[in-house]
Amino acid sequence: MKMSPWGKKLKYMDYLLIIVGTCLMAVAVISAFDKAGMVTGGFSGVAIIVKEWTESLVPSGIPLWITNMALNIPLFFLGMRIGGFQFVKKALVGELCLSFWLAVLPGCIPDFNLAGNDLLLAAVYGGVIQGVGIGLVFLGQGTTGGTDMMAALIQRKLKHYSIAQIMQFIDGLVVVVGMYVFGVYKALYAIIAVYLVTKVTDGMIEGLKFSKGAYIITEKADQVSHMIINEMDRGVTGLKGVGMYSGQDKLMLFCVVNKKEIVTLKEKVDMIDPDAFVIVCDVREVHGEGFIEKK
């Protein structure tokens, strides 16, 4: 079967996201973390440590891209042997792109220090930029090899540990070594950067458009649902349930509104039924009419 033009576009878009994402990751490493001496884990953190250690042997130390590539090469061969080429294909693309940017960008932006001598700004700027970069790579269904691939390979032998647990342990070791090399003070700022990277990456993956979901338990379900449909122009679903205290059948209403509408919804429900029980929760990336519409 031939791939449709739309399928080809999606495939090319994945690789474009990986290319742009790895570029942003390299910018964060080169212009923020490396300049500030912050080790945030991963092979890029190891590369920063190796560069610092080898400054007395090599002018300016061993370049980041060389260490990053050298650490990943044996992993890719091992991964290919265990899981085949499909297991490492997207990670190989991500790693080659990241190493390329780490090699090229220092020549394009020599001595570019994103935050100057301010460690807090370095942690914030670097964390946000790297988080966006990693998020784009993940949205392109790729990785950059490194500790996530190492964790995946180790987990095949240590099945009682999750990949996330193994990654946390490896990255923790890298941060501890970085603390020994650059000092505790910079390591504390590196923790801020790690937190920001995680939060921004999660936001990129889970969606940045937040909505609110509301569960409404009321004796006046018909009136409340009529208000939601006709006055707020939103859909509502009735969920049948049983009140375990009273033993009576209940009809619970569920609807999703945007953040601004949730206040209006609660006020209107209170006007219709002051005894209504309303539960509000966060909802991310709602697909459908009135929110993110699919084509």
Image: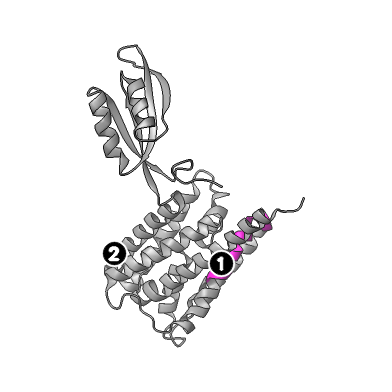
Q: CA distance from mark 1 to mark 2?
A: 28 Å
Q: Where in the figure is residue 258, as x and y percent of width and height?
A: 36, 43
Main structural element of the magenta stretch: helix, strand or loop? helix
- Secondary structure of the residue carrying numbered label 1: helix
**Residue at position x 64%, y 63% from top?**
77
The reply to whether residue 88 is visible in this rendering is no
Q: Report the residue that reaches farthest toward the right.
A: 1
Q: From the viewer's side, name the closer residue of 205 and 48.
A: 205
Residue 90 is one of the magenta-drawn residues: yes
Residue 76 numbered tag: none
Q: Looking at the image, is 186 positioned above or below residue 134?
A: below
**Residue at position x 58%, y 60% from top?**
13
In magenta, the rendered stretch is 84-98
Residue 130 is one of the magenta-drawn residues: no
Q: How many marks?
A: 2
Task: Name the amino acid, label 2.
Answer: Leu
Report whether 146 appears left or right of 35: right
Q: Earlier in the sequence, mark 1 or mark 2?
A: 1
Residue indicated by mark 1: 95
